[in-house]
């Protein structure tokens, strides 16, 4: 049995994303953020989006371009403090922001990818992060119920791939990308280097191709990718 070839173009992959989609976006600041996929999403103009991302990037880059273009309805994130545009959009009511502790965000995504409905934790109890959420008692402790997170689409950035979608990441650019690749039924990966089947050692694969639906090789890296040197 031959493995399917999942390679495509950035334009064709992003065109599969509908209005109103919930989208997980990989990255921690610059490393691992799929800037080219984001820019194509801006160009195509899908609207009423819910984004799940660790941060809001900085002004003028990454998902800030989607916010500035009026395409984002809700952002689920750990912080937006480096992005004055995102703060302004929140304060003016142009977007809704759900804040989440960073480790809890990662665990909610992991739980979604594992098929769980929720996790329980004592993190956030007695703070604004607990407002409106269910609290249960287990083993003599009060615990906060945090719902698992899944999305319609995950946009991720990888270092190397093969046509089946097996992926490797460069150092800390791994961050949220493998978790998000497990928590969405459609996963689009932009990759810096695309090699033939067999070019990746099985031990090096960090996201198996079974989780990836579309692979698009980058023809070049924009300045956004070079803000942090590896």
Image (cartoon, rainbow, N blue to C red):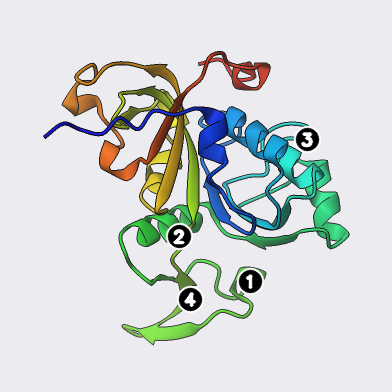
Q: Which residue was labeled with disc 1? A: 127
How far is disc 2 from disc 1 in space, using C-alphas?
24 Å
| Label 4 vs label 2, nearer the camera | 2
How far is disc 3 from disc 4 in space, using C-alphas?
33 Å
How far is disc 4 from disc 1 in space, using C-alphas?
11 Å
Q: Compare marks 4 and 2 and give the one earlier in the sequence.
A: 4
Rendering quarter of residue 81: top right
Q: Secondary structure at mark 3?
A: loop
Q: Nearer the viewer, residue 80 or 22?
A: 22
Q: Which residue was labeled with disc 2? A: 150
For the point 61% across and 16% down, the residue is 226
For the point 72% across and 31% down, the residue is 61
Q: Nearer the viewer, residue 143 or 182?
A: 182
Rendering quarter of residue 162: top left
| Label 3 vs label 4, nearer the camera | 3
Q: Which residue was labeled with disc 3? A: 59
| Label 2 vs label 1, nearer the camera | 2
Tag of residue 199: none
Q: Compare marks 3 and 4 and give the one earlier in the sequence.
A: 3
Q: Which residue was labeled with disc 4? A: 144
Q: Nearer the viewer, residue 119 or 16?
A: 16
Q: Secondary structure at mark 4?
A: strand
Q: Compare marks 2 and 3 and give the one earlier in the sequence.
A: 3
């Amino acid at each position: 049995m031959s493995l399917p070839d999942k390679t495509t173009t950035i334009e064709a992959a992003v065109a599969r994303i509908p209005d109103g989609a919930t989208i997980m976006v990989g990255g921690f600041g610059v490393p691992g953020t799929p800037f080219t996929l984001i820019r194509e999403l801006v160009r195509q103009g899908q609207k009423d989006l819910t984004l799940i991302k660790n941060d809001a990037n900085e002004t003028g880059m990454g998902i800030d371009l989607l916010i500035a273009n009026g395409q984002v309805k809700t952002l689920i994130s750990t912080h937006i403090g480096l992005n004055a545009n995102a703060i302004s959009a929140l304060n003016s009511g142009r977007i809704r922001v759900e804040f989440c502790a960073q480790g809890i965000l990662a665990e909610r995504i992991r739980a979604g990818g594992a098929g769980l409905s929720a996790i329980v934790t004592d993190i956030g109890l007695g703070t604004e992060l607990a407002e409106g959420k269910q609290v249960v008692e287990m083993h003599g402790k009060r615990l906060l119920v945090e719902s698992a997170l899944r999305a319609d689409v995950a946009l991720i950035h990888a270092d190397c791939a093969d046509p089946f979608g097996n992926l490797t990441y460069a150092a800390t650019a791994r961050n949220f990308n493998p978790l998000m690749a497990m928590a969405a039924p459609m996963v689009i990966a932009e990759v810096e280097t695309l090699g033939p089947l067999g070019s990746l050692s099985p031990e090096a694969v960090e996201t198996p191709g079974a989780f990836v639906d579309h692979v698009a090789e980058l023809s070049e890296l924009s300045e956004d990718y070079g803000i942090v040197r590896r």
